[in-house]
Structures are given as structure tokens and as C-alpha cells.
Amino acid sequence: MRTCDFTAIGVPRHYLAWMCEEGWLVREGYGLYRAAEREAA
């Protein structure tokens, strides 16, 4: 997803950095993110 995709659905941009730090997202490049691969609980 792109940064503008997140902001279009109401996710503030500063949440993206937090989600990367927490392991929910992986930054693929400038403005590009993907879901991190995580094991189910």
C-alpha cells in the first residue's frame, strides 16, 4: 500500500512509522508499505 492509501482511509501518517516499529508493517520503499508476515496467535 502507499502512504496516500492509508491516509485515504483515515490512518494518520505518523501511525505508519509506529506500525513499522511494532512489526505490523514493512517499509518496502519511499511511501510503500506491506503487511509484515506474523504468526497467528
Image (cartoon, rainbow, N blue to C red):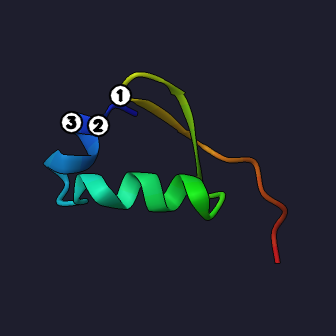
Label 3, secondary structure: give it: helix
Q: Residues within 10 Å of mark 3 (few under 14, many from 20)?
A: some
Nearest the eye: 38 or 17: 17
Callout 1 touching callout 3 (CB < 8 Å): yes
- C-alpha span from label 1 to label 3: 8 Å
The residue at 50%/59% (across/down) is: 19
Label 2, secondary structure: give it: helix
Q: Is residue 15 above or below residue 13?
A: below
Amino acid of disc 2: Thr
Callout 1 touching callout 2 (CB < 8 Å): yes
Q: Is residue 3 above or below residue 14?
A: above
Q: Earlier in the sequence, mark 1 or mark 2?
A: 2
| Image coordinates for residue 34, horizontal then vertical, percent | 55, 37
Quadrant in the picture for residue 10: bottom left
The residue at 29%/37% (across/down) is: 3
In the rendered image, which residue does mark 3 sit on?
A: 4
In the rendered image, which residue does mark 1 sit on?
A: 31
Nearest the eye: 17 or 33: 17
Nearest the eye: 18 or 5: 18
| Image coordinates for residue 14, horizontal then vertical, percent | 30, 57
In the rendered image, which residue does mark 2 sit on?
A: 3
Amino acid of disc 3: Cys
Q: Residues within 10 Å of mark 2 (few under 14, many from 20)?
A: some
| Image coordinates for residue 18, horizontal then vertical, percent | 47, 62
Amino acid of disc 1: Gly
Given the current orientation, which residue lies at the most extreme bottom position? 41
Q: Is residue 41 rendered to the left or right of residue 3?
A: right
User: Can you say which quadrant of the picture contains the N terminus?
Assistant: top left
Q: Residues within 10 Å of mark 1 (few under 14, many from 20)?
A: few
- C-alpha span from label 2 to label 3: 4 Å
Q: Is residue 24 rendered to the left or right of residue 16?
A: right
